[in-house]
Image (spheres, helix red, strand yellow):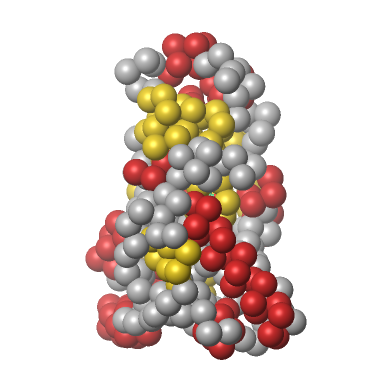
Amino acid sequence: MKDYTKIIEALGKEKVKENEPMKLHTNMKVGGPADLFIEVKTNEELKKAVLGAIKEKIPYTIIGNGANVLVSDQGIAGLVILNESSQIRFISDEIVEADSGVDLSALIKLTREKDLAGMEREVKVPGTVGGAVYMNAGDTGKKEFFGDLVESVEIIDKEGNAKTLSNEECEFAYRSSRFQKSGEVIVKAKLKLQKTDPKFIEEKTRNILERKINHPAGATVGSTFKNPDYDGAGRLIEACGLKNKKIGGAKISEKHANFIINEGNAKAVDVKALIDLMKKSVKEKFGIDLQEEVRYIGRW
Ligand SMILES: Cc1cc2nc3c(=O)[nH]c(=O)nc-3n(C[C@H](O)[C@H](O)[C@H](O)COP(=O)(O)OP(=O)(O)OC[C@H]3O[C@@H](n4cnc5c(N)ncnc54)[C@H](O)[C@@H]3O)c2cc1C
């Protein structure tokens, strides 16, 4: 293993944990140890950790709520930065700037109190602003995504330079953004919301909650796959007879076949084996290549 003495000293011995089990920090509750692990509470701490890792040539991975990641049982090399930066600033009547570690539920609550519409699309989407930018998370049913709200994003590039990107530069598409290729760190995002009648927000929120009422709860990443054009991944997997299929401690939900649930003692390899089975079965029966929405992290 690499010598991490310098980065541990730079970030503070009391703050950096070694061999931290990632299953404690992911919604799927699987994943082996991160070599090094730090929780950051502010943008300054986030930047310090990223720049320190770049300087020492140590790989780094940012995690928000860990709601969309499948971490390998072999763990993650280098430094994992759990991002809990939490500042929210209202810049004008309809423009809000949020740190990337802000929890979506906090932003939903605060903007709703100000009668600002837009964030309803993230109702019941567990995650942070950084995760929502990276994944372009949102409401697939209504095709309303986080990227539609973004005015600009402040980032740190792989060389450690701070930059501001416009909406177009973020290359938002269905569950996709430039960050999935670039490896840049999202520091904060400026969002444009819309002052509205509070009844409109209430109504939209109620509709989303009604639609999501049957979504399974528990240790999961939510939708495993993106929906292919003109069809639902869940419908295709269900038609292959895979609802309730179990491998090890992981199971395809009986409520929604695009959801895999960790029943308590699943390993990442169990989840991955189910994912491979779902892909193979759908390809054989329908000739469709399902694409993962879940992100693989660590030593796969
Ligand atoms: C029960 C359940 C329901 C869900 N429903 C939905 C839904 O309706 N719609 C939807 O879109 N998604 C849904 N998801 C998926 C998930 O909530 C979203 O993808 C969310 O955006 C993940 O945010 P996060 O902070 O947890 O990101 P994480 O899972 O921590 O990270 C996801 C990816 O983003 C990267 N990342 C995170 N923060 C940063 C940053 N600051 N800079 C650079 N990279 C970063 C990570 O490295 C990782 O590759 C659901 C998940 C669950 C568990």
Q: Does residue 240 lie above or below 35 as drawn? A: below
Which residue is at a point 51% across and 38% down the rendered structure image?
A: 75
Q: Does residue 65 lie above or below 145 as drawn? A: above
- Whether residue 200 is visible here, answered yes or no, is no
Q: Residue furthest left?
A: 113
Would you say 118 lies left or right of 206 here?
right
Q: Does residue 266 lie above or below 260 as drawn? A: above
Q: Which corner quadrant holds the C terminus? A: top right
- Whether residue 271 is visible here, answered yes or no, is yes
Which residue is at a point 69% across and 85% down the rendered structure image?
A: 285
Q: Give 50 or 93, whichever is nearer the viewer.
A: 50
Q: Give 131 or 189, whichever is nearer the viewer.
A: 131
Q: Does residue 28 lie above or below 275 as drawn? A: above
Q: Which corner quadrant holds the N terminus? A: top right
Tell me where residue 27 appears, x and y as whole percent: 38, 55
Tell me where residue 106 appears, x and y as whole percent: 30, 56
Which residue is at a point 45% across and 35% down the rendered structure image?
A: 33
Tell me where residue 287 appears, x and y as whole percent: 74, 82
The answer to which image quadrant residue 31 occupies is top left
Q: Give 5 or 194, whichever is nearer the viewer.
A: 5
Which residue is at a point 32% across and 69% down the rendered structure image?
A: 217
Q: How many marks?
A: 0
Tell me where residue 201 appears, x and y as whole percent: 32, 78
Q: Give 195 or 278, whichever is nearer the viewer.
A: 278
Q: Residue furthest front?
A: 248
